[in-house]
Amino acid sequence: MVNMEKLGTSVLKIILKKYSVYILLLAIISGGITTFIVEKISPSQYIATNQVIISPKTNDAQMDLKYVSTYKELLTNEIILDKVHNNLKRSNINRSTHDLQKELTILTDTDSQIVTIQVADNSKNESIKIVNAFGLVAQDELPKLITTNKSKLLNGTDQAYRIGNINKMQLMLITSTIFFVFYFLIIVRIIFKRNKLFFPEQVADILRTKRLYQFN
């Protein structure tokens, strides 16, 4: 009497050994295509951040802090956006003022007098360059818009952080693994369907053995 569990395992091993290269290639191609489509539909985004500190131009402690809360509007006006746009063009980064405004987030804190500038972009390197361009323009232009205050860029940045936990390589690995299992199961199903019942001669053919077993 044949042990059907062992027989099934043996058949699966043979199928895997025979078709594994083809399944792997097909899975990698499918995973790559899926990753490409996902990146096009929902591209990765990176956030880069720097900070500008606002302080009075004189030693007078009576700084008009009410203006700090208006810097969001000031940093998104056409004067600032145009200057950032022109500066970026010199670095071969083409962003319209409308796109720059959509990518920009301004966070203000009247207690610390710090304005935080954040830029979200699909490119890690370009998000860094854009946020640094905003910081430098803010440092130069904000004092012209609010003459009682001065601004200073605390620090440029060379870092950007990806939004989300799965990068392209991880996504491709996951999708390729899923496709590998999927295609393997399809092949197994096709082979089993073609051999609806494992008669002795079919077992011998699949397992490539010389001995035939009689099923009761």
Image (cartoon, rainbow, N blue to C red):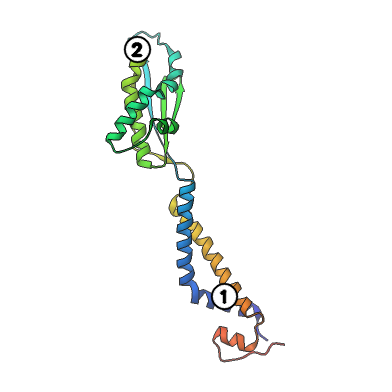
Of label 1 and label 2, which has the lower sequence position? 1
Whether residue 155 appears in this view of the structure is: no
Q: What is the quadrant of the C terminus in the image?
A: bottom right
Q: Amino acid at mark 2?
A: Thr
User: Residue 57's quadrant in the figure?
Assistant: top left
- Mark 1, other Cα within 10 Å: few <14 / some 14–19 / many ≥20: some
In this rendering, would 90 be left or right of 145? left
Q: Secondary structure at mark 2?
A: loop
62 w.r.t. 122: above or below: above
Residue at the spot of label 1: 12
Task: Identify the residue shown where x is 65% and y is 81%.
Answer: 3
Viewer-nearest residue: 59 or 90:
90
Residue 85 in sight here:
yes
State the separation of the CA atoms marked 1 and 2: 78 Å
The secondary structure type at the circle numbered 1 is helix
Q: Is residue 39 above or below residue 66?
A: below
Residue 134: horizontal and vertical position, in percent?
Answer: 35, 28
Q: Quadrant of the N terminus?
A: bottom right
Residue nearest the observer in this picture, 59 or 103: 103
Q: Amino acid at mark 1?
A: Leu
Residue that mark 2 sits on: 147
User: Residue at 36% across / 11% down in the picture?
Assistant: 148
- The picture places residue 207, in percent across and down from the top left corner, at 56, 84
| Image-based side of 110 in relation to 190, left or right | left
Q: Residue 125: x and y, percent?
A: 35, 41
